[in-house]
Image: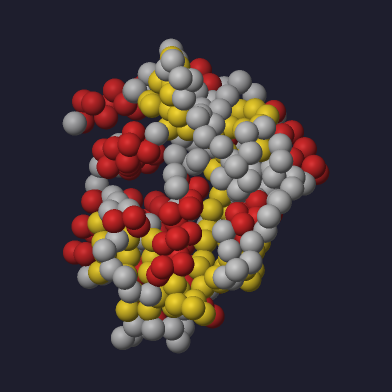
Amino acid sequence: MNSVSPNGQHSRSYLPFPLEMEKCTCAVCSGNDTRTLLTFDAFGFPTRTVECQKCGLVYVNPRPTRSYMENFYRKWFRFFYEGRLKIDEDYIRDKKWREWDASRAKRYSAHLSGVKSVLDIGCGAGYFAAQVKAENPGNTVVGIEPDSMMVQHCREKLKLDVHEGFFETYPSKERFDTITAFHVIEHLFDLGNFFQFLRDHLQDNGVVIIETPNVGGSWNQIGLFHIAHLYTFSPRTITNLFAVNGFEVVEVGPLENDLDNSNLYLIARMMPGAKLDSPTRDLEESARIAEKCSSLGNIRAIRVMRNWAKMGYFAVRR
């Protein structure tokens, strides 16, 4: 049940509720030459995951529109992904937020201890920001989070300073020594705005720390690919993304442990005046990713039925 507008730029799907789609180009090299890896996502949505034939970036094209996804995040995100309408202790234990964020604080301690200010974009329930603040008394620790339920938890339970909204609506001009964004960059529509935000809010010698799913990692299920993940990076393609936007990558690598399942991390600094002009594709990496995608099989019908049932339950609960 798809339709395309007369100009070919917009399509619509009704699985399992109205989904607005638009065409886009590669975020790294602006290329249009792609090959299709998958024709549906982990939830059964008819989203097309493609690989750029010039630089190898894996991304969704057509992708959901920004206005659609902003509404999706506000109204359905938490329940649709995790079946939850509120944050309680069982939810916190199930997600292992305390353990995950404690491990992050330890992993990046060299870039967190001794600094005066930290900004956590997409701070979620706030346990990473709370951990950083507890370990560095007197430091400024600020969060940005669009989910009102998460913001309420951060403010009321953890007494954190959190801006409710997206980074584009953050009102302060303050610069920070460290900016973190864990599982954020794969959701962003305008990566140019994101990098401009980093340039505007990082101290000259500051660092940005990123975590995101790793398409070059050990994954073997379709869960890595879903409607809200507009890009799925490998260490190589995310390095290229930062390089073309004028950032020097200090460190990048895979995260494979009990808490992280096929993720990656990146630490970068601003590098004014230097850019990577022509990133190219790694043919061996491309072949591995394509082979793993082809092994997933056609399981869309089961996932569509499962999500219709979930949305029906959601409608009853509401």
Q: Quadrant of the C terminus?
A: top left
Foreground pick, 108 / 200: 200
Please state the horizontal and vertical placement of residue 92, each as a whole percent of the image: 34, 55
Residue 100 locus on image (x, y percent):
46, 62
User: Extreme front residue here?
Assistant: 273
Query: Which of these two is toward me, 261 or 88?
Result: 261
Residue drawn at x 27%, y 42% as measured from the top left:
74
Q: Residue at x 48, y 53 (%)?
A: 192
Give the residue at x 37% y 38%: 66
- How many marks the image carries: the answer is 0
The spot of residue 16 in percent (x, y) is 37, 22
Tell me if I can see residue 274 in this picture: yes
Residue 310 appears left or right of 221: left
* Colour mode of the rendering: secondary structure
- Give me the residue at 21% from left, 57% from top: 152
Left or right, residue 33 beside residue 201: right
Residue 146: x and y in percent read 30, 51
* Closer to us: 242 or 115: 242
For the N terminus, the quadrant is top left
Res. 309 image quadrant? top left
Can residue 256 be seen here? The reply is: no
